[in-house]
Amino acid sequence: MSEIKLYTKKFDFYYGHLKALTDINLEIQKNKVTALIGPSGCGKSTFLRSLNRMNDIIPGTIIEGTVALDGKDIYDKNIDVVDLRRRVGMVFQKSNPFPKSIFENVAYGLRINGERNRGKIAHRVEESLKNAALWEEVKDRLDTSAMDLSGGQQQRLCIARALAVQPEVILMDEPASALDPIATQKIEELIFELKNEYTIVIVTHNMQQAARVSDFTAFFYLGELIEFDETDKIFTNPSQKKTEDYVTGRFG
Amino acid sequence: MELKKNKLHQTPVWWRRLKEQVIEKFFLVHGMLAVLILMGIFSLLFIEGFPAFKALGLKSFFFSTKWNPTSFVQESYGILSILISTLMVTFGALLIAVPIGIATAAYIADVAPPRVREVIKPVIEVLAGIPSVVVGFLGIIVVGPLLSRLFGTSNGLNAINGSILLAVMALPTIISISEDAILSIPQEYKNASLALGANKWQTLIRVTIPSAMSGIIAAVMLGMGRAIGETMTVLMATGNAPAMPHSFLDSIRTMTATIAIELGETVQGGIHYRSLFVIGFILFLMTFFVNLISDLVLEKYQKVNR
Amino acid sequence: MMKINWKKMNEKLGFSVLRLATLVVIFILFFIIYDIVSKGISSVNWEFVTDKPRKGMTEGGIWPAIVGTFWVSLVTVIFSVPIGMFAAIYLNEYAHQGRIVRLIRLAIRNLSGVPSIVYGLFGFSLFVLMLNFGLSVLSSGLTLGLLTLPWTITASEEALKTVPMSYREGALALGATKWQTIRSNVLPYAVPGMLTGTILGLARAAGETAPILFTGVAFFWPILPKFPDALFKQFMALPYHLFIMSTQHHEIVKVRPLAYGTAFILIVLILLMNTVAIWIRYRFRKKYKRI
């Protein structure tokens, strides 16, 4: 049953001369939620952004080792980074809707992929907004600016925008860190729904959140992967002392 | 790579990549144009001017004060007096503009409340936008008579007039760049000084301005570059006598004014024509080095502040 | 106690000196504007704006100079804005730190320091003679285009910098190519800023005299040809007209009111452009603060 969607092997990452990640070996299973936890600056966000090569846009970054999607190295010369990002979507920490209408935000990914059929676009927009549990709230004002939505709605809009291009993996970088508890709960419920169709990797600061939403948890510390296991095990019976210290709140 | 379920991309990857490559190169070419134009200016001035240089020799250009290309008796192309005139009005302009400019920059950056700053900044910008010909016009009509009354000279078209006008032209440059330099000094520096019991004035004079000094020097250099290259104001307000100046009350003629006055009267390709390109070339080199120095100073200062 | 008071007085005095310097700068600007406006406005009437100069330029108006300045500025914009924008897009969106970028930036900074009269020489040699455009609107417009290029690049780059990084990241993460990202998520939001820079550059170009001196401006050229013939003809221009009316005319004192009128129109034109530009920027900033 368990199928590996993404894995990294001996993965190192540098910002110029600064080594940010060392020897990361991680297997991410299909249709599961994998949480990346650890204190700030531990490299978990850097790692997440390596999975769809968003770090490419930062000058001076160097990688070593392998990151593979469906068994193919995504840093291989023959891989098209645009294709990769269509398959591996991303939701950012700070919700970043474009200053366009709600409809155009969700349709963006379709349009840049050359979809011209209006009916198809409208259909996909509706479907994506429904999947992101936002449809009921915005269906009467699709033409209004996305900037007027609340923080939580904006973040769900960004999720809908990512869903519209039908990725296989969704990366979420602390998607609820700037939201209030109710909005956070909605996002968490949404993640739970989405894993039926998508493979999800989520970076979070919030350990309860990791415990609630994820199937697997990876604990990062100072650029190294300390422990990776089923979430239950990480939170109840970790094998590493550092992990235990962190999840019990002794530091971080 | 096998792609499932994602039905979206119809365009083949190679085509998309090629397109992106071509687009990037397109923009790169436009960026490179700046380099090309700079090199073009350099080479064209050199090519046009070189024959005159060759025919007349270094010595008669730089060590003769006599500029009289249209003389019937003996044409002479000594640029020494116009070179010195240029440096003289520039120096005079800086004498006026540097203290006022730095003081204004310090006021805007360190003293003025934000709302006052919001008003002054557009003023500086608009001042930078006043055409030099308008400033020159007022030099003739307002500054000139004022100077002639003040110093009892027959007219006020002289080096001081030019310096005053050039100061006006250089002020916006000096102010805005000095202001940036002063603003970039981290608050911690100032706090350290304030914590030691210095008041705001002492902090400004002893800490902030010295720390911003390289930026201010760069600002002065750029202001100097503007003054050296300014044409219309000096053309209109300095009287344009092509002789060696002895005082700031003398009528003078700068390098820029010489080109402006004489190019239209020369025979194209003749020695006189080419000698004006030599002057242009020298002007180009002067401003180039002034800019380069300010660049180096700024670069050093950015490194120090990092 | 005595010492502290002394310190305090020192501070007060120092700040007053700074304030005085600032007031001097403000005074200079307001004096220029006040003098030109107060003495120029009486010369300005309908005839002055719409008529040709007459009777050896001792009477009549400045219409040909207004038209000439317009044509030249148009050529300047058409030449310099696209190139400046494209170069800025390269520098801000594509280029990484490297030798080529440093070279381009060095060139831009140095170009902005090249004296305008040197641009005039260059334009004369390149456009008038080598490319055989002759003394014309085209030669002058292109010369001014070169002069304004560094400003256009810098202003466009500033405008691009104000577009939040997250707009770019969001698009890239959806699988947009670099160019798609720039076209849909960067340029639309940078345009108002670019417009500001363009107008400011244009205002400065419209007031420049030295670069057009040998490239096409005429002492007296009252003919108003239609486009595109105008491109290859000589022209009158406001700043040059002011220059000859105040220094070259045979009856300088008599035509002084006309010179003031010309200066008035020139200043008003430039202030208007500056105001529009600053207003656009102000609105643009406000809009972005909301986001």
Image (cartoon, coloured by chain):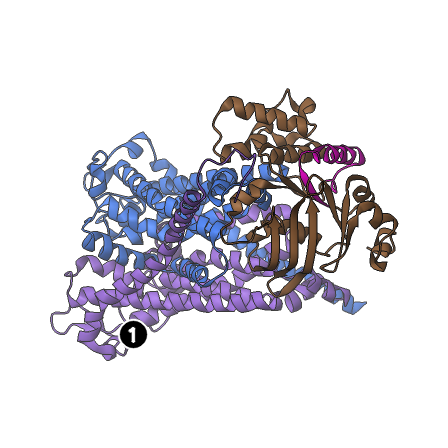
Label 1: how many Cα within 10 Å (few below 14, some 14–19, many 20+): many
x and y percentages locating residue A8 in the rendered image = 65, 54
Colour blue maps to chain = C
Q: Is residue B57 left or right of residue B219?
A: left
Report the magenta residues as a range. A176-203
Res A5 visible = yes
| Residue with the most extreme left position | B72
| Residue with the most extreme top position | A140
Q: Residue at x 15, y 60 (%)?
A: B268
Q: Chain of mark 1?
A: B
Check disc 1 and report its element: helix, strand or loop. helix
Q: Quadrant of the C terminus of chain C?
A: top right
Residue C19 or residue C155, whichever sits in front: C155
Drawn colour of chain B?
purple
x and y percentages locating residue A154 in the rendered image = 67, 34
Taking B60 as reference, is B280 above or below it? above
